Image (cartoon, rainbow, N blue to C red):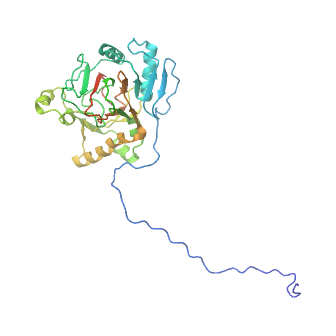
Amino acid sequence: MTDPHTAGTRTEPVVSTTTATPAPTPRLRAARVPDGGIYEGRRTLRRVPEGWEDRPYELFRLVPLGRVIGAEIHGLDLSQPLGPAVREELNRALLEWKVLFFRAQHLSPEHQRDFARHWGELETNPLLARGASDEVVRFDKGGSATPTFENVWHADVTFRERPALGAVLQLREVPPVGGDTMWADMGCAYDNLSDEIKERIDGATAVHDFIPGFSRFYGPERLAPLQDQFPPVEHPVVRTHPESGRKLLFVNTSFTTHITGMSREESDRLLRELVQQAHIPEYQVRFHWQPGDIAFWDNRATQHYAVDDYAPHRRVAERVAIAGDRPF
């Protein structure tokens, strides 16, 4: 029953004047990781420079092997001369994918040289074992020659005033397991540097020398006579690709000795951080060889690593390198 004394009136809600106590902010224990490391997170993965026009390939079939680097080319016989249109389209593929693979070509040394010459004059390299001619370098792991070891991230012959434009490598004999080669896109390596690091290396140069890399397996009697032929040279820490215009990180573990104008401690610390960039898998492609396979890579835009995991088996490869220009 309704109370006649309260009928028709509103009952106001009771408002509490007590303030709720906020939950305490969680606290983390003190912890740190070393400065200059590589950490997880979203990475910028640009295969081509900004504004680059992507067009289909019409004269062969291209099958990408990675997000930013590496593609197989099908439908070409490299023992036959390249017409101008095929050469132009292959060059565009090289600029866009940085390393091209051709399966089961089984080229003679002469045909391998002829293919490479479509991109310029060929290099000779007195520091490495000779193949069928002065322009052919032979890597015979398991043979009688003094072995060299390429299982470190590097670009070829950056100790030259004009480092190689690129190289054409063919596997003559492959081990039953292992022996892959990996390539890294040094455009992506540059893109993902912090703004602070980019500012520090803008306009910087570094010294490159053949002594550090080759003294790991050759003695002074082999290297000293070549010192006048290959004096130390300076190259930009960040070079500009002469065809694509893309900025590329251009220092490597094998041949870069120090950054010009820095103390040894500062240079070593910065170089360690820079050369680590090639180690990031998102920028890489890995290729498993079969006899007669060919890899053609842009040495200006990449570094590579030959995986040395096949001993005691034999691995035989032959390489022809194309002379490049002075980095800028």
In this rendering, does residue 322 appear at all? no
Position of the C terminus, as image quadrant, is top left
Residue closest to the eye, 174 or 102 = 174
Q: In this rendering, would 208 be left or right of 24?
A: left
**Residue 46 location (% of width, % of height):** 46, 36
Residue at 16% x, 32% y is: 218
Q: Quadrant of residue 190?
A: top left
> What is the number of callouts on the image?
0
Residue 80, compared with residue 69, is above or below; it is above
Position of the N terminus, as image quadrant, is bottom right
Residue closest to the eye, 175 or 308 = 175
**Residue 82 location (% of width, % of height):** 41, 13
**Residue 295 location (% of width, % of height):** 37, 25
Residue at 13% x, 33% y is: 219
Residue 151, compared with residue 124, is above or below; it is below
Residue closest to the eye, 219 or 233 = 219
Find the residue positioned furthest to the bottom: 5
Residue at 45% x, 48% y is: 41
Residue at 43% x, 32% y is: 69
**Residue 106 location (% of width, % of height):** 35, 17
In this rendering, does residue 204 appear at all? yes
Residue closest to the eye, 162 or 185 = 185
Q: Quadrant of residue 200?
A: top left
